[in-house]
Amino acid sequence: MRFFIIDDDEAIRSMLAQIIEDDDLGEVVGEAEDGSLVDAYLLNGRKVDILFIDLMMPVQDGIETVRLLGSFAGKIIMISQVESKNMVGEAYSLGIEYYITKPINRLEVRGVIQRVAERMRLEKSIRDIQRSLNALTGNPAEQQATCTEKNILTSGKLVLSELGILSETGSKDLLEILLFLYQYEKKKPLGHEFPSLKDIFLTIAGRKLGRSANTAELNREIKASEQRVRRAVIQSLNHLASIGLTDYSNPTFENYAPKFFDFTEIRKKMLELENGTKSVQSPIRLHTKKFIQAFYLESKRLNEQE
């Protein structure tokens, strides 16, 4: 990964560069002390993947600079001591990926870079697969189907990454469910008729174990799969609630939280995280089917956009 840093504080530029280099996250290919010194031509010419930019600078601030970087091909991470929701919201509306509040925290910077890098890899995979599909001429329908299935799975991985659960064990089960629903809808449009969770998990278990599996083996695998998915759903709830608690206007929170969870449950989790205690009187209820439906529809929407 290639980085460029814009900040009027030399100490901040040095700290970011040190984090990037010490943790082997990539290479810093340029620095500037003000947004007026940088344009898209410069950044693209240096093949910058990720741009760190300060919000408040003396001549041209971060908001104005991002607005003028229309043709910049990389991702943008904004850093600032300012925590105004209006300014943060405006920054996100201009297309930045993350907003990091000063003082700089090494673990936060590293985590944000890793998430942005993962998103870039997934987006590249989607583009590559889409180009392969567009290039197919005269190939059998079965080969095309295989490519489209890879495409929906790549979109699914991007969604799981946004939900903060791509590395969870249950993500494999969710991707298998995604593929099943994608194939199912080709034969029978879902509309308002969504397969039951029982049928979904039974099908996934049967595919994994094969036709020779007996009832006891199937039941064990179904139970294990349900537990893995449930743990992934819980982790996703924690991830989104944590984002919302830090920045309610974060686009990831605004986009995914209401789609995947009921607002009351999100709010309960945010209060738990804020207070450091679990709610005893009104425990959080998880709706696995709602989550799976949202996961399928969001992956499908993303796939159709590419």
Image: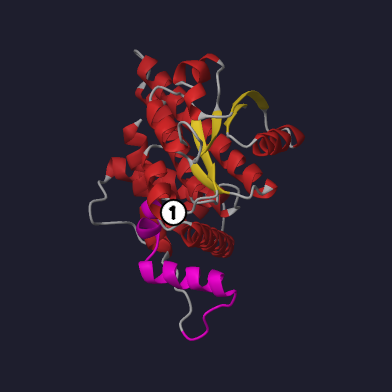
Residue at 58 percent of width and 64 percent of height:
220
Is residue 265 highlighted in magenta? yes
Q: Quadrant of the C terminus?
A: top left
Q: Is residue 258 visible?
A: yes
- As drawn, the residue found furthest toward the right would be 22
Report x, y in % for residue 150.
46, 33
Badge 1: residue crowd in 10 Å (few <14, some 14–19, many ≥20): few
Of all residues, the one furthest to the left in this rendering is 191
Q: Which residues are magenta?
A: 254-281
Q: Quadrant of residue 301?
A: top left
Amino acid bearing label 1: Ser
Please state which of residues 82 and 238 is positioned toward the viewer in this rendering. Answer: 82
Q: Main secondary structure of the magenta part?
A: helix
Name the spot of residue 168 as percent of width and height, x first: 59, 52
x and y percentages locating residue 282 in the rendered image: 45, 82
Q: Is residue 260 magenta?
A: yes
Answer yes or no: is residue 215 visible: no
Q: Secondary structure at mark 1?
A: loop
Colour scheme employed for the rendering of this structure: secondary structure
Residue pictured at 54% horizontal, 45% vertical: 80
**Location of mark 1 (residue):** 84
